[in-house]
């Protein structure tokens, strides 16, 4: 069983799908590992480190030759992939449907790691959670870098510096980490979510929950643990609540995403205008259309004196740690299904059917075929 690890080609992508740690673990299972030269360069992993761990290092053609599993962070180009091979990566199936069709035509079995079901036994395989955790942390650091003031309250002989007021919108994995990080930096933190069940999580981190009380939201979790689209009545009530609260904030961090749909609009231009000059908004959903009106993917823009931060691929801005977590997700996934007799992983229906996009030249995932 040969596993290939490719160098990422997407602009700005600094992560890598394996580390020397996971290379050693795959070899211990009986696999051979080939790594494309330079794959770990931007994640501070030298080719020599992969070679020392037991991998062969070569060009792309040599890396792919005879590979039965190809690992990536983002989906590799279909050209050159061995027919019949598995491709396990973050494949962005909804936005990159043409590439999914190309995988089918190339005869590879594409496995979208972001489709991993949110069940207990798959937690260690969940790339969305591991990468979102880092995104929430980095969002606060990016906000602090753009904010022209201190985060904690400081009492000095020259006077007192007030604590920054941080408002987190969307309390999933990224939002919870943003709350925790802002609290550690000494900010006064509040947060909101459409899921009523998150109120206790917010309180447990020492932040203030801001919730619509008059209109019912989602009591538990949405489908697969994600939030779902809310009623128009709830949206109106939430907008009114947020408008009064957001005007008093120094920093807003938005994290709301709905799988397969554009990011919900949480902050309007009028709400941006209500914030005082020098305030900062970080939109973690900017690549899916953005939670904030006026956010631009890949840019920091200024509207009404407020900086709106729209960095792309935030986990890649912490490439070494993001790669380590992503690589462990991939190893945990493949090793959980490793069949010693077959010398390869054998997927079950629950997880295999959830993440498999293509097989035998066809697109087979119900979420893409409309059968879901």
Image (tube, helix red, strand yellow):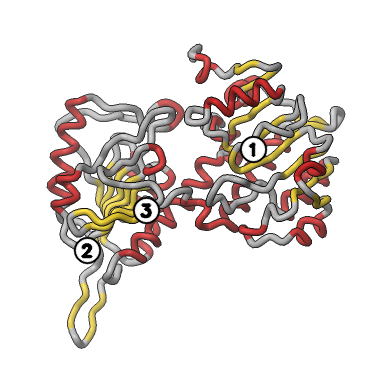
Helix, strand or loop at label 3? It is loop
Mark 3, residues whose alpha carbon is within 10 Å: few (<14), some, or many (≥20)? Answer: few
Q: Quadrant of residue 229?
A: top left
Q: Residue at x 26, y 76 (%)?
A: 154
Helix, strand or loop at label 2? It is loop
**Alpha carbon distance from label 2 to label 1:** 41 Å
Q: Which residue is mark 2?
A: 278
**Alpha carbon distance from label 2 to label 3:** 17 Å
Of marks 1 and 3, which one's residue comes earlier in the chain?
Answer: 1
Q: Left of 6 or right of it: where is 276?
A: left
Q: Which residue is mark 1?
A: 76
Q: Nearer the viewer, mark 2 or mark 1?
A: 1
- Quarter of the image for the N terminus: give it: top right
Q: Left of 300 or right of it: where is 127?
A: right
Q: Which residue is mark 3?
A: 299
Residue furthest top in the image: 371
Mark 1, residues whose alpha carbon is within 10 Å: few (<14), some, or many (≥20)? Answer: many
- On the question of residue 1 being in view, the answer is no
* Residue 122 disc label: none
- On the question of residue 260 being in view, the answer is yes
Number of numbered discs overlaid on the protein picture = 3
């Amino acid at each position: 069983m040969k596993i290939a690890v490719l160098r990422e080609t997407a602009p700005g992508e600094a992560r890598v799908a394996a580390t020397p740690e996971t290379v050693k673990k795959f070899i211990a299972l009986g696999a051979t590992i080939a790594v494309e030269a330079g794959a770990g360069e931007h994640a501070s992993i030298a080719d020599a480190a992969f070679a020392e761990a037991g991998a062969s290092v070569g060009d792309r053609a040599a890396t792919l030759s005879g590979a039965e599993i190809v690992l990536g962070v983002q989906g590799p180009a279909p050209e050159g992939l061995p027919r019949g091979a598995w491709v396990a990566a973050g494949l962005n199936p909804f936005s990159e449907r043409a590439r999914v069709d190309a995988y089918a035509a190339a005869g590879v079995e594409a496995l979208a790691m972001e489709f991993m079901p949110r069940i207990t036994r798959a937690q260690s395989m969940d790339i969305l959670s591991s990468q979102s955790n880092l995104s929430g942390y980095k969002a606060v650091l990016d906000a602090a870098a753009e904010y022209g003031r201190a985060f904690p309250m400081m009492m000095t002989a020259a006077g007192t510096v007030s604590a920054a007021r941080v408002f987190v919108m969307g309390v999933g994995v990224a939002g919870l980490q943003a709350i925790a990080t802002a609290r550690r930096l000494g900010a006064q933190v509040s947060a909101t979510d459409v899921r009523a069940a998150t109120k206790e999580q917010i309180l447990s981190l020492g932040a203030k929950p801001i919730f619509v009380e008059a209109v019912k939201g989602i009591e538990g979790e949405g489908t697969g643990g994600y939030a779902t689209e809310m009623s128009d009545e709830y949206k109106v009530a939430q907008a009114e609540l947020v408008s009064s609260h957001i005007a008093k904030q120094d920093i807003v961090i938005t994290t709301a995403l709905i799988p397969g749909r554009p990011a919900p609009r949480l902050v309007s231009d009028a709400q941006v205008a209500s914030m005082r000059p020098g305030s900062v908004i970080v939109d973690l959903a900017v690549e899916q259309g953005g939670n904030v009106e006026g956010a631009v993917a890949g840019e920091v823009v200024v509207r009404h004196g407020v900086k709106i931060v729209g960095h792309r691929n935030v986990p890649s801005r912490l490439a070494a740690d993001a790669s380590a977590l992503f690589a462990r997700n991939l190893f945990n996934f493949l090793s959980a299904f490793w069949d010693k007799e077959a010398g390869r992983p054998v997927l079950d229906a629950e997880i295999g059917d959830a993440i498999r996009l293509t097989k035998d030249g066809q697109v087979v995932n119900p979420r893409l075929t409309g059968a879901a």
